[in-house]
Image: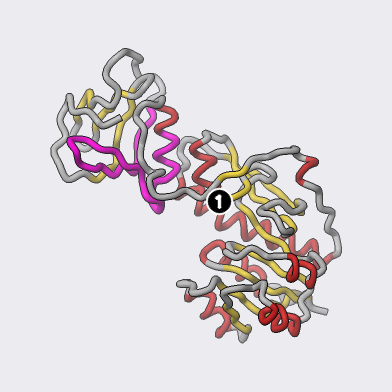
Amino acid sequence: MKFNIGYFADGPWGHQAFIKLINNSDISISFICGRHKTKDQIFKNFAKQYNIDYLEHNNVNSDEFISKIKNYKCDLFVSMSFDQIFKKDIIKFMNHKIINCHAGKLPFYRGRSVLNWVLINDEKEFGITVHYIDEGIDSGDIILQRSYEITDLDDYSTLLNKAYVKCSEILYDAILMFKKGDVKAKKQIDFDPVGSYFSKRKKGDEILNWNQSSREIFNFVRAICNPGPSARAFICNKEMKINQVAYLQNSQIYKCEIGTIIKKEYDSFLVKTKDSFLKVVSYEYDGIIEEGNRFEV
C-alpha cells in the first residue's frame, strides 16, 4: 500500500524534495498546498504534470479547509517552506502527524532568517532539522537532524544552495522513516532547556556598523549578501551597497578614525574598523571614493 502524504510547500526548498518523493513508487502525493497568492508557478506545473490536486487557501486552519483535506485520508502532512502556522484543530485531525523541515539546529536557531543569523554569529556549522509540528514555532519533537560545515568561503548564497539540497535529502529520509514505522522522536528540552530564537530581519537591519571588529563586519556582510539585501553604508551623504568584503587575518592593528578609507586600489579599498582593517571588494556606489574619506559610523 502506498504511503499517502499531503505536501504544504513553496519555492526551491520544496521543489527538490518533491522530485525525490514523486520518483518513489511507494509514496503518493495526494495534494500540493502552496502559499496563498504564491508566485511559485513550478508547483502548479508539477500538479498538472503529475495529475495532483493543487490547493491554495488563506487559512489552512479554517473548518472549510480542514473539511476538504479530510477526504484525502493522508498518512502524513509535510511542510517545507510553508508560511502558515498549523493550529490545534488541524494538528488534532491529523493525530499530530504533521512534520516540518527547518534549516536550523533545533532547539537552537528557531524562528526566521536562520541562515543569515548563523553567519552573523560566526558559527562553524549549521543544522537542518525535521520535527513534528505542535502549536509553538519550531518547538516540536525532533525526528531527524544533521549538521553541515561553514567555512570562511561560505556566504548567504552558498548556504542557501547547500540548504536547498540537504533539506530535500533529510526530509525525504524522514518520510521513509514514517513509511517504515521507524520514528523515534526526541524532545527539544532534552537537547537544551532554552535553545535560541531569532526574529525575521527587517528593513534597516542591513545598515553596517563600522564600529565593530573586522571579523564581525566580515560576517555581517556575507550574511546578507546577494540574494539578500546586501549591507549598506554611507559616505559623503551617499549610500553604498556592499556585497563582499575580504577578511585580512594578519592586518595591522593601529589607532585611526574608524570608517576611514586608508587605501584606494583599482577596484577595491581598505577601511579602518574597530580593531584593524578590511578590504571592500564588491560594491555599488554612485560617487567618487578617495583615501581619507570616512564612512558614517
Q: Name the residue at 28% across, 27% down.
A: 259
Q: Name the residue at 49% across, 74% down.
A: 37
Left or right, 168 with respect to 115, comes to right
Q: Position of residue 161 (x, y in %)?
A: 50, 54
Q: Name the residue at 67% across, 82% down.
A: 64
Q: Position of residue 249 (x, y in %)?
A: 41, 23
Structure colour scheme: secondary structure
Left or right, 249 with respect to 235, comes to right
List the residue tagged with mark 1. Answer: 112
Q: Position of residue 276 (x, y in %)?
A: 35, 20
Q: Which residues are magenta?
A: 218-247
- The question of residue 82 being in magenta is answered with no
Residue 179: quarter of image: bottom right
Work out whether 251 lies above or below 99: above
- The question of residue 231 being in magenta is answered with yes
Left or right, 246 with respect to 142, comes to left
For the view shown, which residue lies furthest in the top direction?
254
Label total for image: 1
